[in-house]
Amino acid sequence: MAFRCNVGVRGYVFADLREVMAKASPARSGDTLAGLGAASYEERMAARMVLAELPLKTFLDQALIPYEADEVTRLIVDRHDAAAFAPISHLSVGDFRDWLLLDSTDSIVLAALAPGVTPEMAAAVSKLMRNQDLILVARKCRVITRFRNTIGLPGHLSVRLQPNHPTDDLRGIAASLLDGLFYGAGDAVIGINPASDSLSAMTDLWHMLDEVRTRFDIPTQSCVLTHVTTQIQAIERGAPVDLVFQSIAGTEKTNASFGVSLALLREGREAALSLKRGNLGDNVMYFETGQGSALSAGGHHGVDQQTCEARAYAVAREFKPLLTNTVVGFIGPEYLYDGKQIIRAGLEDHFCGKLLGVPMGCDVCYTNHAEADQDDMDTLMTLLANAGLTFIMGIPGADDIMLNYQSTSFHDALYLRSLLGLKRAPEFDAWLARMGIADDRGHLLDVGRDHRLLRQLPNLEAT
């Protein structure tokens, strides 16, 4: 079905809904690389004018990727909650934007709506929104999850402590871990990207993290970010696995390139649940996503990269994760060229995920060959923190020496807390106070050289 729009004396024709969505997107290098993006600002505006008039029901009638060809499409269609959708079923995409911005559309209303929103609807309305709209609506969305602490409360910001090491050296990891704990980081998760693919080496990491957590009774969770099949094997061999991690995407073909399927993710979740390691909740999954992954894998089906990314959040939503984050600038400038594109993508991803009911964090990051710098990341993390971001990364000096990219530091989280009065997970803040690392208001203390963490942390001698 073709769509037409006149802008001045010029008429534009869009072959199908996929083309409308792609050409309505803000400019980004990935869509240009795929041959999908608008050729001019005028064409982009024409596509947005068409999109604004489309009924939301259009996305229930016209699948961007055929139902028969893609299990993610089947998941989206089969899980759609018609009753939750009913209050907005009469709206166009443009009307939906206006409705989301109403004061009366509050957190309670948005939570009830989430099961009725498809990723394509979320992506469509985001294409009509300014940055301030994405921030304002996302801030109203509340998604709270629990494992050993409570993540996502209003006025809170959590941090993934990321103590990576290029050789998985336990002493090096322990040093970064200690550094992060003294800066009050780690309430989202203590998560390591292992350099090795050896199950034996990764099992050592799981045991080391669990020894630290149990010795000091830290109310958080750990994760070794390897393939879900490896984690299932580790669980079968008795490893102390808290969260099961996997990178996911918005199409079956792209997920297959990662070596995963919905069935395999279900198996991973069931394996983690069988351990019953959470004492506050059963949100046992941790997912990472990123715009451009579908195009990189040749699995985008002619769908723009931001819509493919939103579809990944339907996959995440299905498995009730504790944490999900977009690694927004990690794939590189082929997909998000510069700071402007990275900032916009981060705001879109956070908005779409939260609107769908997913606990959204962001690895505010860039690669060294992108046209971006740390000032761009300062801007994005400040905007996202105002938008109610669930968590960011905490990396020594913001420079990941194993993955070789630029992210956010322990100090960045302190800046956001000071600027916006954001708290950590309450159970973690209480632990920091008990340990003499922070006072009862969450402000960090000068711990001194004789602190028990320095004296007792395994695999690290106080110097």
Image (tube, grey):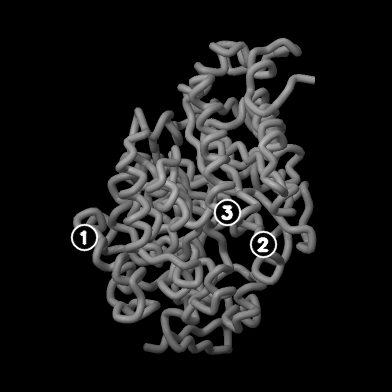
Q: Are marks 2 and 1 in contact (CB under 8 Å)?
A: no
In this rendering, does residue 436 appear at all?
yes
Amino acid found under the numbered disc labelled 2: Gln
Picture coordinates of residue 247 (x, y %)?
Answer: 50, 58
Tag 1 residue: 82
Q: Residue at x 76, y 39 (%)?
A: 397
Q: Earlier in the sequence, mark 3 or mark 2?
A: 3
Amino acid found under the numbered disc labelled 1: Ala
Tag 3 residue: 198
Q: Residue at x 66, y 58 (%)?
A: 329
Picture coordinates of residue 248 (x, y %)?
Answer: 47, 61
Q: Earlier in the sequence, mark 2 or mark 1?
A: 1
Instruction: Please say if 356 is above or below 370.
Output: above
Label 3's element?
A: loop
Assess disc 1: are there few (<14), some (14-19) or many (≥20) residues with their C-alpha within 10 Å of its C-alpha: few
The answer to whether 206 appears left or right of 57 in the picture is right
Tag 2 residue: 341
Picture coordinates of residue 275 (x, y %)?
Answer: 34, 39
Distance from the alpha carbon under mark 3 to that under mark 2: 37 Å
Label 2's element?
A: helix
**Which corner quadrant of the image does residue 122 belong to?**
bottom left
**Which corner quadrant of the image does residue 108 belong to?**
top left
**Which corner quadrant of the image does residue 38 belong to?**
bottom right
Q: Earlier in the sequence, mark 1 or mark 3?
A: 1
Instruction: Please say if 430 is above or below 33.
Output: above
Picture coordinates of residue 198 (x, y %)?
Answer: 57, 54
In this rendering, does residue 352 appear at all?
no
